[in-house]
Image (cartoon, rainbow, N blue to C red):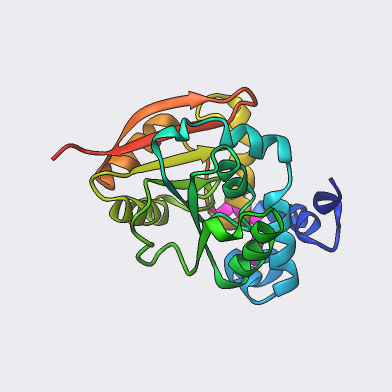
Amino acid sequence: MRVGLDLEGFGGQMDLAFTGLLHTLRTGGPAWETVFGTPFWEYLAARPAMAASFDATMAAGTDYVIDAAAGYDWSGARHVVDVGGGTGALLAAVLETDPALRGTLVDLPDTVRRGREHLAARGLGDRCAFAGQSFFDPLPEGGDVYVLSSVLHDWADRDAARILGRCAEAAGAGGRVLILQQHGTEGGDRAEMDLRMLVLCGGRERGLDDYRALAAGAGLTVAAVRTTPLGQVAIDCAPVAG
């Protein structure tokens, strides 16, 4: 809990953004840039210490990381690409399920640098490749499963569609795209996070029909949906035949 309760770190700044809630209610736009003077992602990019705190916050919650890794059958995969994977907490948990698996971590350069250190400390560095880049650019090809874990809810529909499209493009005809979300796709359990994403960066939580529509726009179809024991949702997307 320490990283989430650090008032000088991302946890404290995230909650402070809610002092601009009235702006969000009036305009539908994110309050973050009203409170801090800069859009969310630009703010993090200009402040390395805060970006590192954000990465640490995203990697916290070991139980949820293990639960997410167990929420998919990786037995048919040889190479997993974690897109927007932070410092590699989820990728490490996935690789530890099977010593034959290899992985690629994709995130912005400073985050990938921290991820390289984290995965090396876990004894997994020699099984990983690293791509320090934006996920709006073409992604590394050759993966069997492209994972988007708690990524798409950070973005409005147009940008979420672009990210999913890049994954589908890299996965090709034989790959899969796995969307992992920490909150359910239906019902009131996603309401708080829905508001939080809107206030911070203009994103939103989505229902299963929303994900089906995003997938279809990227040339994918939702092949299976599973809810994990901790209530996370794994949406397995496959390329549309033909």
Q: Residue at x 44, y 33 (%)?
A: 75
Task: Please identify the dominant SS of the magenta region.
Answer: helix
Q: Is residue 228 magenta?
A: no
Give the camera-side residue of 145 and 177: 145
Q: Residue at x 34, y 35 (%)?
A: 212
Q: Quadrant of the C terminus?
A: top left
Whether residue 93 sits left or right of residue 235 in the image: it is: right
**Residue 133 image point, x, y percent:** 48, 69
Q: Is residue 32 magenta?
A: yes
Q: Which residue in the rendered view is the most extreme toward the bottom?
A: 46
Whether residue 179 sits left or right of residue 198 in the image: it is: left
Q: Quadrant of residue 118?
A: bottom right
Q: Residue at x 65, y 77 (%)?
A: 46
Asked whether residue 23 appears in the rendered view, the answer is yes
**Residue 153 image point, x, y percent:** 52, 46
Q: Quadrant of residue 222?
A: top left
**Residue 93 image point, x, y percent:** 62, 42
Give the camera-side residue of 193 and 9: 9
The magenta segment: 23-33
Whether residue 13 sits left or right of residue 109 in the image: it is: right
Q: Quadrant of the N terminus?
A: top right
In the depicted structure, whether residue 144 falls above or below residue 116: above
Label tally: 0
Whether residue 36 sits left or right of residue 232 in the image: it is: right
In the depicted structure, whether residue 225 falls above or below residue 213: above
In the depicted structure, whether residue 166 falls above or below residue 237: below
Q: Residue at x 23, y 46 (%)?
A: 173
**Residue 200 image point, x, y percent:** 63, 55
Asked whether residue 152 appears in the rendered view, the answer is no
